[in-house]
Every structure is written in C-alpha cells, then in structure tokens.
Image (cartoon, rainbow, N blue to C red):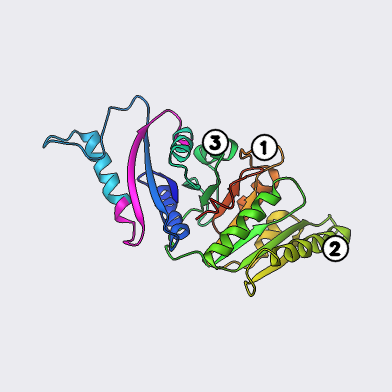
Amino acid sequence: MRYVVGYQPDERGADAVALAIAIARAQGAKLDLMLVLGENAPYVAANPEGSRINPEEQQVLTAQRTALGMIPRDIAAEFHVRQGNSFAAVLIEAAVEFEAALIVVGAASNGLFKRYTVGSVANSLLHASPIPVALAPRGYHRLEPIERLTAFIGERPGADAAVDVALVASRRRNVPLRFVSLVELDARGEHGENVNAAHRHANTVLTDAAGRLPEGHEATVEVAHGRTLEEAVDGIDWLDGELVIIGSSRLAQHRRLFIGSTANKILRALPVPMVVVPLEYERAESHPLG
C-alpha cells in the first residue's frame, strides 16, 4: 500500500505529510514524498554524488532532510524529485505508476487556521484524479492514527462510492464509522419533508452498513441541518482524529474526480481532513485508503 504525498518546503507541505502519517499509521502503508520542480528548472538530484553540490541541489537536500525528518520510525517513506509544468499532473502520474491508494496534499496557505481555501494544485487534482485525494486543512499537525471516519451521504450519484470506501476502510482500521446527511433548510428555517427524507435515507444506509460490518462494530448516523450547508457543518461535533469521506460530483467523468458546489460548500466549513472519492470508484475492496 502506497500513498503519494505532494510535498513542498512550506506549511502546506508539512500539513500534507502530517495527514499522510495519520492515515497511514498502523496500516503498513509506504509514503512517497514528491517534490515537484518546474520543467525548466536545472537538473537536481535528491542524492547528488561528489563533493561539489550546486545551490539547487542543496535546496533539494534540505527539503529531503526536512520531509524525512518528519516521518516516525514506524512509517516507511521515500523521497522523490520530479520535474513537470503541472504539480497535479506529476502527482497523478506518480500515483498511477506506484499503484497508490491515495494522493495527499495540503490546503492553500492563505486559508484560515484549520479551514480550506483550495489552491491551484488541489483544484486540478479534484478535477482530474482517478485516485482518491486527501486534503489537509491549514495547520494540520496531528500524527496519531485516525480515530473515526465520517462519510457524507446522499442520494446523488457519487455517494455510493464514498460509502463503499468508508465501510471498507472502517472495517480494516477497526475504527467507528459515522454517516452524516446534510439538509439545507428553507428561508423560514422549516424542517419539512426534506429532513424526514434525510432521516429515512440515513437509516437505510445504516441498516445496510450493519450487514457489511463485523458484529459489534460501531456505526452511527446523524442528520445535520442549517440555513446553509456551512451552518449545518458547523453544528456537527468533530473529533481531533476525524477523517471525512465524500463522493465526487455527478458531473465527473467515469472514475474521475470533480468536486461540485455542495462539496465546495462543505469544504469551506470543514475543520478536519477530507478525502474525495472518484465517481464510481471500483477499487474500494483492494485500496480502501489503507
């Protein structure tokens, strides 16, 4: 099991590495830390030979020492340097090459603490990756194993893939699984049939999950509502070790990511890491995030 981690020597890179460690912990997953340089950058090596090291190689060596210095002894990791005009394209290419189960990146550095502002790299990944993408909110430094998985559910295409991945990952990690359905209230704040329908669907998902999880495995369901989706997300209780799983938009191409307007709203309010699963993702059983 391998995870490709988009690394750069800044806060975003540190956030991505921390999240990758938390997800990989106790799973035997190897981290491939990818430093991507511009296609026209002078050739540099992560392990230059000889006594003379040019400034570009020295910068790479410093980045390598910093990145690998973050990795605990119980996690296997390798540092790679690749060149390309598109950071996202290089990460996708590496993930396909390594048959990785996940691509991990940090949120844009100008976001509020523990909130997201999706930068160009993450945005490109969320529109093109055939592999699940994990996004670390700004300031994410937790290295302990994931404590609970939360899957956002709904009746739109894309939700089933997220539920499948969450079920398999929860079962293999032996961590609690929570299903959350979000409801945006009308202008008068009335619950109406939408909330009732959300409860019915959520209970159906929970019943199905109970048949696919080991006996005694903790699984719960919750319906959160607010005047906006952001308000609904703000009203949810989160663990420090939470990981959210959400499906790709129905507008995505087959087995490709596309984060739609609903997921974007959730993303802006979410204080914990999130994994976006490609539409109709077919490898949940063999690659369930570790």
Q: Residue at x 48, y 53 (%)?
A: 138
Q: Residue furthest bottom?
A: 216
Disc ID at residue 280: none
Question: Is tag 2's residue or tag 1's residue first in the polypeptide sequence?
Answer: 2
What percent of the width, then of the height, locates residue 266?
Answer: 65, 52
Marks 3 and 1: which is nearer the front? Answer: 1
Question: Is tag 3's residue or tag 1's residue first in the polypeptide sequence?
Answer: 3
Disc ID at residue 124: 3
Which residue is identified by label 2? 196
Disc ID at residue 252: 1
- Label 3 SS: helix
What percent of the width, then of the height, locates residue 197?
Answer: 84, 59
Residue type at the position of mark 3: Ser
Residue type at the position of mark 2: Asn
What percent of the width, then of the height, locates residue 257?
Answer: 61, 40
Q: Is residue 198 above or below residue 38?
A: below
Q: Tell whether label 2 touches label 3 (CB within 8 Å).
A: no
Distance, label 3 to label 2, CA atoms, is 37 Å
Marks 2 and 1: which is nearer the front? Answer: 1
Please state the extent of the stretch shown in magenta in the rendering: 68-88
